[in-house]
Image: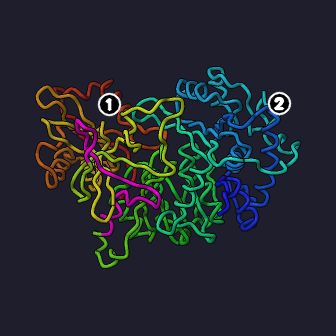
Amino acid sequence: MMNYPLTLAQILEHAHRIHGDKQVTTLLPDGTLHRYNYIALYERVKRLANAITQFGIQRGDRVATYASNTYQHLELYYAIPCIGAVLHPLNVRLSPLQLAQIVGEAEDKLIFVDSGFTAQFKAFQHKIACQQVIYFDPTAADADVPYERLLSEATPVASWDIRDENWAMGLCYTSGTQGEPRGVLYTHRSMFLHTLAANQADVFGLTEADVVLPLVPMFHAMAWGLPYATMFAGADMVLPGAKPPCIANLIAETGVTVAAGVPTVWAKAYPELRKRRKDIGGLRRLIVGGEAMPLPLIEAYEKELGVEICHAWGMTEMSPTGTFSKLRGAHRSLSDAEKWRIKAKQGRPIPGVELRLAAETSNGFTELPWDGKTIGELQVRSPWTANNYYKVKPTPEHFTTDKWLRTGDMATIDADGYMQIVDRAKALIRSGGESISSIALETVLLKHPYVHEAAVVGIPDEKWGERPFAVVVLTEQTTENISDILRQQLASEFPKFWIPDKFVFVDEIPKTSVGKSDKRALLAQLASQNLLDKSSTVCKNQIVEPAHKK
């Protein structure tokens, strides 16, 4: 058999030759749409690739992007890796200090900056080591060679010269939820194989007939691999730009069939999508990740809008997809309620991914059964899963001696292989020697029509070690005693010691850079307001403006 290297150049060439007429549509800051096809994209990528080498970029050099989901960023997704350099998308939501540390560690040689983030970037540019910058915005004062002029003056590269599929193609950093961000280096081989697996019918299931909208940022784990999966499938792509769009308008105007984003995005978008359901009839599937989508929201999308909800789970360390939740043929006879309960799980391992549940012992790890009840640490391995962090030696905290990644998640897996995250290992609340799942409590709280968002955290307790503490965003104004109502709801499903000692009602729960509830920031916020002291007065219902009615 031919020893043929698996590289991103193959994806680009296939999209150009076989699907050249398919469209890339970008929402621009002024509200207009920029459109061109894969043939035009290909020609620009070839010019861009040659232009990048003029800055002295060589194989293995890191080239950073500080950008949103735009056609220029998509061009860089291909041009940088296809010359053998390493694409390094910077998370625009990280702090200047974190970005300075990351750029320094990565030793970025060149940075491309999106028009929507020019001012934001310049405000901290003096803090970072890399001063070689190309701006998308032609009016940027110090942009001697703006992006478009750079392309217009360059000649197309003659050919792609990636001789080894194990060359690095991308460097992504974790969001820092469990500490400082850590770098993960992807290879051409790992991303190519991830793309093949993601495009399986029971995973993303993209086809040439689809129009795909990645709302997940391109700086977050390569937008879940969608820029590569979409083009390899030959689907049209819609990019929402830097400015938060009206999702319903964008879907209606461009005919989106598959969209991907975190649950908070879909919670906010639901009311408008429901109003315009006649205009979004082509939308058939939402890929949801980052954290679990509340069961009532899954039900609302499937029942009211006829849109299939598919949970995906993964990590930056996994390129990032690990599991995907779709019903099996054996589930067809189940009731809708039973189907939705299955869909609320994080799903089964996609082809190529292995999972195991483990309990740590003095002699290492003991593998636990897949019975849907036993809780263990989730460990994974696959051809696109990291076996160490960038510039960091593997440690037993993150990798086992037999080369499995320790995800830090506590989970169950049932006999059919459906995995469900119970909590982060470090986020389990230990009360009187017993474990309390914050995720399980949040899931039940979100079933109540008065609850828009919920976060449960553990706070120190002299008697029990830790006790659960609930923070809630309400959907509407009310004079009822919501604390008692929610306690009763939780008491119907959990033992008494699981019930939070205190409820606080706020206008907003802080989010991480990738849209998850930021519990560290939340704890700091509550502490600054002296709300964590159990001796303080139990919080009365706070009247808030309506956020979203289920």
Q: Residue at x 61, y 65 (%)?
A: 211
Residue behind mark 2 = 144
Magenta stretch? Answer: 339-366
Labels 2 and 1 touching (C-beta < 8 A): no
Relative side of 537 to 116, left or right: left
Q: Could you tell me which quadrant the C terminus lies in?
A: bottom left
**Secondary structure of the residue carrying numbered label 1:** helix
Q: Residue at x 32, y 69 (%)?
A: 339
Residue behind mark 1 = 523
Q: Nearer the viewer, residue 56 or 247?
A: 56
Q: Amino acid at mark 1?
A: Leu
Q: Residue at x 53, y 38 (%)?
A: 184
Q: Nearer the viewer, residue 278 or 198?
A: 198
Q: Amino acid at mark 2?
A: Asp
The location of residue 80, given as percent across then percent down, is: 71, 43
Indicate which disc residue 99 carries: none
Q: Residue at x 46, y 61 (%)?
A: 351
